[in-house]
Image (tube, rainbow, N blue to C red):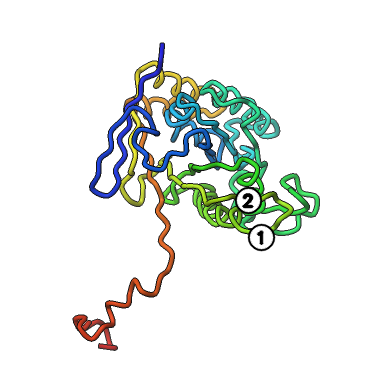
């Protein structure tokens, strides 16, 4: 059965309604569109974007998934402590391929689970597993893969999530978007022609500001997302997560991040002679 989606995008006071991402976008690039979902842990992207991934594939958009950590801290029994990373890698392939993403489009970056704060930036690799062109660090990896994939739109868990790995991934990805668009580190590939649009997913915590996109779907498509979540059976709490997602119904929300670069003229009017005098603090 053909999947059915309904999409609403909010742009300022405008409310755009359609049945596809293309129908609610004024900047859709057609065959040039390519999506990259960046998942701090293997199950994050399925929880936060299992419907969005299916919608993109339904619209013919190539989808790539970057799994940042190795899942090594996700063991729920002592017996699995040494093997959990391999187990979760296989569960990840089963889950995300079931949503329609080609296996070859799923990339594991291999950074240690629950330790991403130690891998901010870029530095010589010294033989580490995560080495690319002799360097390691999240900015090194993200810049390389962004130039390799060349996405038009990128999705990542919100900075508002409590898990430190989510916060670090969001922060490091955002600066890497500009590295990838610039001339820095030429050994990591050809610079992007433009900075991709970036969107936030809510995994465990609410957005810092209201979302700008809602996706709803038919029951069969929703069940496919739930089955993809269930593939992570090594995670003992997965049943509870599935119950939470099921109770919320077939809907996902996404927030577009709009960068505001510093422009001095933004504040110029505050200091004009005609501006009201500010009576704040000891310097009034």
Label for residue 262? none
Label 1, on which residue?
184
Which image quarter holds the C terminus?
bottom left
Q: Which residue: 42% across, 26% down? A: 242
Q: Position of residue 58 (x, y in %)?
A: 46, 24
Q: Is residue 260 left or right of residue 32?
A: left
The residue drawn where x is 44% and y is 22% is 226
Mark 2 is surrounded, within 10 Å at the Cα level, by few (under 14), some (14 to 19) or many (20 or more) other residues, namely many
Given the current orientation, which residue lies at the most extreme bottom position? Answer: 283
Check contact, mark 2 vs mark 1: CB within 8 A. yes
Q: Which residue is mark 2?
A: 143
Position of 161 compared to 178: left or right? left
Q: Nearer the viewer, residue 133 or 230?
A: 133
Image label count: 2
Nearer the observer: mark 2 or 1; the answer is 1
In percent of width and height, residue 172 lies at 56, 54
């Amino acid at each position: 059965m053909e999947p059915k989606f309904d999409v609403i995008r909010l742009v300022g006071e405008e409310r755009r309604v359609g049945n596809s991402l293309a129908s609610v976008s004024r900047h859709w690039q057609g065959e040039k569109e390519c999506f990259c979902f960046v998942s701090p842990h293997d199950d994050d992207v399925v929880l936060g974007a299992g419907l969005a991934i299916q919608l993109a594939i339904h619209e013919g958009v190539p989808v790539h998934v970057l799994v940042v950590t190795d899942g090594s801290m996700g063991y729920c029994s002592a017996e699995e402590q040494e093997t959990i990373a391999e187990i979760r890698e296989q569960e990840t392939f089963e889950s995300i391929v079931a949503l329609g993403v080609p296996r070859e489009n799923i990339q594991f970056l291999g950074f240690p689970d629950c330790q991403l704060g130690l891998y901010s930036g870029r530095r010589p690799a010294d033989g580490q597993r995560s080495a690319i062109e002799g360097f390691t660090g999240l900015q090194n990896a993200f810049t390389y893969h962004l130039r390799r994939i060349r996405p038009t739109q990128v999705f990542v868990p919100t900075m508002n999530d409590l898990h430190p790995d989510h916060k670090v991934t969001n922060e490091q990805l955002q600066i890497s978007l500009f590295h990838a668009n610039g001339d820095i580190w030429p050994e990591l590939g050809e610079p992007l022609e433009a900075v991709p649009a970036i969107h936030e997913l809510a995994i465990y915590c609410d957005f810092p500001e209201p979302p700008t996109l809602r996706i709803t779907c038919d029951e069969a498509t929703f069940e496919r997302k739930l089955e993809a979540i269930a593939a992570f059976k090594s995670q003992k709490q997965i049943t509870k997560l599935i119950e939470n997602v099921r109770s919320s119904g077939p809907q996902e929300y996404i927030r577009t991040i709009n960068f505001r670069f510093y422009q001095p003229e933004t504040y110029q009017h505050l200091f004009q002679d005609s501006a009201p005098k500010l009576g704040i603090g000891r310097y009034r």
